[in-house]
């Protein structure tokens, strides 16, 4: 009984930290795919939303760089304060990057709970736990890169990092919120997975310890990409692009 309670408390804590909604919350199902026609509007929305999110986060990087310069040049602050503040900043980015997105980035277990999954698929609780671990590794590796780059934020490794986060948020919109299982396949490969490999490589080049720390995310995203592909196969293998939707009459 105590073990069950402890497990429930742990799950609630992890879901709260990672912002994952549980229960029977419903996404509005007001449209369905009735043709194989490409939804051009959806493609444009995804692209525009991702570009705007990247732009906002780069602007935030610039703001952090200006702030840290002021702190480093002010003798009234302890020498460790800018590092502490930077760690908090990267923690915010790693856990809540979606606050900078105009797209619906609701984190929910509903889609994963309701679709057909392969037998080897991890249980739902595994995802927020693993992503919380990855968030910690992202903070550590990004701080190491920031230190290596002389406390600068507007540098290629960190810009690529926020691009990676934005691509992951857009993928979440496509898969979790809109349940476009076909479009989610190429997006997860060309977006979160490929960008994770690129970020890890440039982190490694900048600071080998940072790259080594972040490399676990590549392993997990490889597993996730394979899982997304198998889910697509098991749930009808719809076209690998967003289908045009038709409103449902109520």
Image: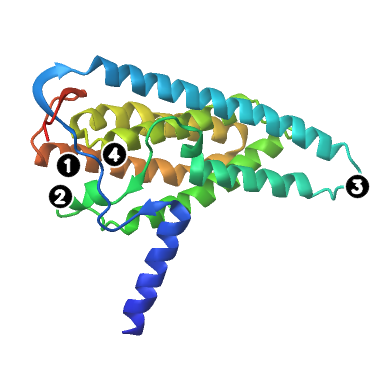
Q: Residues within 10 Å of mark 4 (few under 14, many from 20)?
A: many
Calculate the distance from the C-alpha at mark 1 to the C-alpha at mark 2: 7 Å
Numbered disc in front, either 1 or 4: 4
Q: How crowded is mark 3: few (under 14 residues within 10 Å), some or many (20 or more)?
A: few
Q: Do the residues labelled 1 and 2 touch (CB within 8 Å)?
A: yes
The residue drawn where x is 37% and y is 28% is 191
Q: Give residue 10's position: percent from left, percent from top.
A: 41, 68
| Image position of 70 with respect to 140: above or below | above
Label 3's element?
loop
Which residue occupies the extreme front position in the image?
250
- Disc with the residue nearer the chain's start (1 vs 4): 4
Q: Nearer the viewer, residue 90 or 201?
A: 90
Q: Are marks 3 and 1 in contact (CB under 8 Å)?
A: no
Disc assigned to residue 177 = 4
1 sits to left or right of 36: right
Label 1's element?
helix
Q: Which of the 4 image quarters holds residue 124?
A: bottom left
Q: Nearer the viewer, residue 19 or 164?
A: 19
Q: Give residue 200's position: percent from left, percent from top.
A: 49, 35
Disc 1: which residue: 231
Disc assigned to residue 2 = none
Disc 2: which residue: 118
207 sits to left or right of 54: right
Calculate the distance from the C-alpha at mark 1 to the C-alpha at mark 4: 16 Å
The answer to whether one can see residue 2 in this image is yes
Label 2's element?
loop
The residue drawn where x is 86% and y is 47% is 77
Quadrant of the snapshot with the C terminus: top left
Disc assigned to residue 76 = 3
Q: Residues within 10 Å of mark 2 (few under 14, many from 20)?
A: few
């Amino acid at each position: 009984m105590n073990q069950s309670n402890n497990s429930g408390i742990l799950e609630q804590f992890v879901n709260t930290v990672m912002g994952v909604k549980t229960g029977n919350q419903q996404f509005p199902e007001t449209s369905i795919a009735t043709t194989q026609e490409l939804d051009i509007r959806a493609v444009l929305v995804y692209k525009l939303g991702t570009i705007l999110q990247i732009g906002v986060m780069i602007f935030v990087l610039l703001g952090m760089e200006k702030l840290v310069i002021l702190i480093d040049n002010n003798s009234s602050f302890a020498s460790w304060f800018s590092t502490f503040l930077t760690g908090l900043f990267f923690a915010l980015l790693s856990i809540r990057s979606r606050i900078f997105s105009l797209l619906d980035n609701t984190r929910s277990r509903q889609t994963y709970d309701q679709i057909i999954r392969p037998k080897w698929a991890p249980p739902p609780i595994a995802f927020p736990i693993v992503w919380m671990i990855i968030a910690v590794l992202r903070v550590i590796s990004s701080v190491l890169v920031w230190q290596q780059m002389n406390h600068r934020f507007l540098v290629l490794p960190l810009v690529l990092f926020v691009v990676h986060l934005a691509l992951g948020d857009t993928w979440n919109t496509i898969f979790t919120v809109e349940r476009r299982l076909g479009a989610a396949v190429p997006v997860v490969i060309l977006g979160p997975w490929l960008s994770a490999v690129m970020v890890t490589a440039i982190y490694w080049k900048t600071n080998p310890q940072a790259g080594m720390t972040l490399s676990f995310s590549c392993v997990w995203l490889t597993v996730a990409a394979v899982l997304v592909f198998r889910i697509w196969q098991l749930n009808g293998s719809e076209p690998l692009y967003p289908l045009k939707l038709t409103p449902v009459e109520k």
